[in-house]
Image (spheres, rainbow, N blue to C red):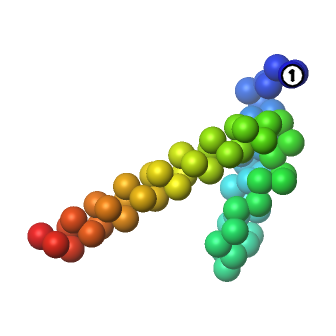
Amino acid sequence: MDKIKIQDIKDDVELFSKNQKDDKESKEIDLSNLPHFSEKQKIDALNNLIESEIVNVGQIIENIKK
């Protein structure tokens, strides 16, 4: 596998962020525009995002219970 350059990652993240902002109505996350990441890295990133969202929801529920 080719080594990933930091600038490549920054470029991908900027492009991803821009595309997500342009598509605010959609809740879908398009990972096809991240050419420098492997499929496993994309899946790991999604899993981390899902886990953090679950934690956020759990904290909101706890706050409502208080």
Give the left or right position of residue 50, taking residue 28 as reference. left
- Whether residue 10 appears in this view of the structure is no
Query: Is residue 37 depicted above or below 48 in this figure?
Result: above
Identify the residue shown where x is 28% and y is 60%.
Answer: 59
- Whether residue 32 appears in this view of the structure is yes
What is the x, y in percent for residue 31?
77, 53
What is the x, y in percent for residue 40?
73, 38
User: Which quadrant would the C terminus be assigned to in this image?
Assistant: bottom left
* Tag 1: amino acid: Met
Judged from this view, the residue extending furthest toward the left is 66
User: Which quadrant would the N terminus be assigned to in this image?
Assistant: top right
Query: Is residue 1 depicted above or below 7 in this figure?
Result: above
Query: Is residue 28 depicted above or below 17 in this figure?
Result: below
Residue ID for mark 1: 1
Identify the residue shown where x is 46% and y is 58%.
Answer: 53
What is the x, y in percent for residue 49?
54, 52
Identify the residue shown where x is 32% and y is 62%.
Answer: 58
User: SS for tag 1?
Assistant: loop
Identify the residue shown where x is 81% and y is 46%.
Answer: 34
Query: Is residue 63 depicted above or below 18 in this figure?
Result: below
